[in-house]
Image (spheres, rainbow, N blue to C red):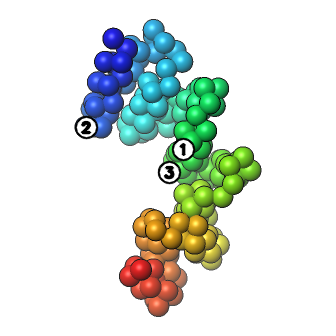
Amino acid sequence: ELGTLIHGADILAKVGAHDKAILECEKVLERDPGNLQAHLIFAWSRDRLGDYAESLDHYQTALEIANTQGFPDLVQEIFLTIADLHRRHEHLELSLYWCTAFERFHGCSSRCTLIRALTMQALGEEDEAIELFREAVHQGPDETLPRYFLGVACREAGLLAEAQAAFLE
């Protein structure tokens, strides 16, 4: 029955029925407080509803569970999701902290560098942001988001040739 509730919560969250997804997750968590999927769906839905604090709590719980259960790829994904959550909710120093922690434990990745670049841009550090966007493009040459944000940042900085190159590659 828990599997059915999780599956239903996942579908509800994907179609934007976040309140209903949360209710399904709460039912699961009442019976199984350590259910990793329920915490992730709950966190994602709370974030979509603008509830930063409760979303963060569930992401951190999911991080602990994923780490304990030995899911290293998921641990990395949740780390970066928390860093980006902080950035999107303008807790920029916390975003940088989580990026630094990620890099210490997992090394560099284009997504982490991209989050750091977006955070530096939000802090008004345009030159450093552009350097970090360049680094993210170098780390993930086939990824489109770093290239897009590099193009936008370069265009805004008047580096039109580099902006055009970023958009066209």
Q: Which residue is mark 3?
A: 88
Is residue 50 found left or right of 16 in the rendered image?
right
As drawn, 92 above or below 144: above
Label 1 crowd (10 A; few <14 / some 14-19 / many >=20): some
Circle nearer the N terminus (2, 3) = 2
Q: Which residue is mark 2?
A: 15
Q: Residue at x 43, y 71 (%)?
A: 148
Mark 3: secondary structure:
helix
Q: CA distance from mark 1 to mark 3?
A: 16 Å
Q: Report the mark closest to the observer, 1 or 3.
A: 1
Q: Residue at x 46, y 89 (%)?
A: 160
As drawn, 92 above or below 7: below
Circle nearer the N terminus (1, 2) = 2
Q: Which residue is mark 1?
A: 77
Is residue 118 found left or right of 101 in the rendered image?
left
Q: Residue at x 37, y 14 (%)?
A: 2
Mark 2: secondary structure:
loop
Contact, mark 1 vs mark 3 (Cβ under 8 Å): no
Circle nearer the N terminus (1, 3) = 1
Mark 1: secondary structure:
helix
Quadrant of the image occupied by residue 126: bottom right
Q: Quadrant of the C terminus?
A: bottom left
Q: Which amino acid is tagged 3?
A: Arg
Q: Which amino acid is tagged 1?
A: Glu
As drawn, 156 above or below 135: below
Q: Position of residue 138 (x, y in %)?
A: 57, 72
Q: Residue at x 69, y 54 (%)?
A: 107
Q: Is residue 155 visible?
A: no
Q: Which amino acid is tagged 2?
A: Val
Q: What numbered label is drawn on residue 66?
A: none
Query: In the current view of this chain or complex, which residue is farthest to the right?
Result: 104
Q: CA distance from mark 2 to mark 3?
A: 22 Å
